[in-house]
Amino acid sequence: MIALVIALVIGGSSRVQKDPAYGAQQAAPRPAPVRTTVVDNATVTVTRLRFAPGSGETVHTHDFRS
């Protein structure tokens, strides 16, 4: 019984070293937000985004140029 446990431990650790994807987490696809246009005229467009519970936008930035 002890030899079996040792063999599994040794075999498991070598698998991690041989397969770099072993144990890697896959990101679940995010559902698209529901978009509702609130104001849309010649000056501005305002859109409300409703995200599913537990989801949201990823952190990002915008370059502002004059």
Image (cartoon, helix red, strand yellow):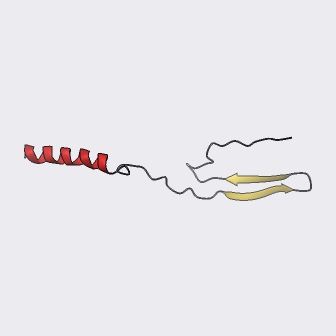
Residue at 33 percent across and 51 percent down: it is 19
Left or right placement of residue 26 versus residue 45 in this view: left
Left or right placement of residue 47 versus residue 32 in this view: right
User: Is residue 38 or residue 42 the one in the foreground?
Assistant: 42
Figure quadrant of residue 37 = bottom right
Give the x, y percent position of residue 31: 58, 58
Q: How many labels does the image show?
A: 0
Figure quadrant of residue 10 = top left
Residue at 92 percent across and 56 percent down: it is 42
Give the x, y percent position of residue 54: 55, 48
User: Is residue 38 or residue 11 the one in the foreground?
Assistant: 11
Left or right placement of residue 11 versus residue 38 in this view: left
Figure quadrant of residue 6 = top left
Left or right placement of residue 4 versus residue 64 in this view: left
Residue at 77 percent across and 54 percent down: it is 47
Residue at 63 percent across and 48 percent down: it is 57
User: Is residue 23 or residue 14 the one in the foreground?
Assistant: 14
